[in-house]
Image: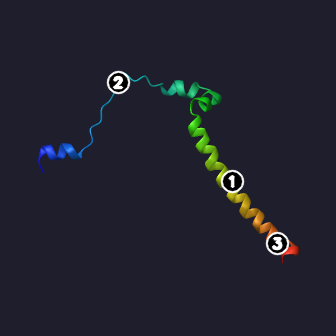
Amino acid sequence: MTTEQENKLTPSFSHDSDVARPSTTDMKSQSLWKNLRRHPKAVGYCVALTSGILLWGYDMAMTGNLAGLPAFQ
C-alpha cells in the first residue's frame, strides 16, 4: 500500500487550540441548575430513558400483583 493510499484511509483530525473550554474546576463549581439549563437536550434524553425503565418495572410489578388477586385466579 502506498503512502497516498494510507493517507486516504486514515482520518485527519485537527486540534483547534483557540476553542475556549472550561477547566475541570470550573465545571465542578457550576450548580446543578446551571448545568441542567446548559444541556437541555441531554436532560430530555435522560428523563425519557429513565421514565421508560421505571415504567417497565412498574408494569411488571402491577401485572404480577393483579395476577395474584383472588378475582383473577
Specify few, some or many for label 1: CA neighbours under 10 Å numbering under 14, 14-19, or 20 or more.
few
The residue that label 1 is drawn on is 54
In the picture shown, does residue 70 fall above or below 22?
A: below
Gap between marks 3 and 2 measured at Cα = 64 Å
Specify few, some or many for label 2: CA neighbours under 10 Å numbering under 14, 14-19, or 20 or more.
few
Residue at 68% across / 58% down in the picture?
56
Q: Of the residues under marks 3 and 2, which one precedes in the sequence?
A: 2
Residue at 76% across / 66% down in the picture?
63
Residue contact at pointers 1 and 2, CB within 8 angstroms: no
Please, what is the three-letter code of the amino acid marked with disc 1?
Answer: Leu
Gap between marks 3 and 1 measured at Cα = 22 Å
Q: Position of residue 26 (x, y in %)?
A: 53, 24
The residue that label 2 is drawn on is 17
Q: Of the residues under marks 3 and 1, which one precedes in the sequence?
A: 1
Please, what is the three-letter code of the amino acid marked with disc 3?
Answer: Gly
Q: Position of residue 23 (x, y in %)?
A: 47, 25
Q: Position of residue 37 (x, y in %)?
A: 61, 29
Quadrant where the C terminus is found in the figure: bottom right
Q: Which mark is residue 68?
A: 3
SS state under label 3 = loop
Q: Of the residues under marks 1 and 2, which one precedes in the sequence?
A: 2
Which residue is outermost to the bottom? 73
Gap between marks 1 and 2 measured at Cα = 43 Å
Please, what is the three-letter code of the amino acid marked with disc 2?
Answer: Ser
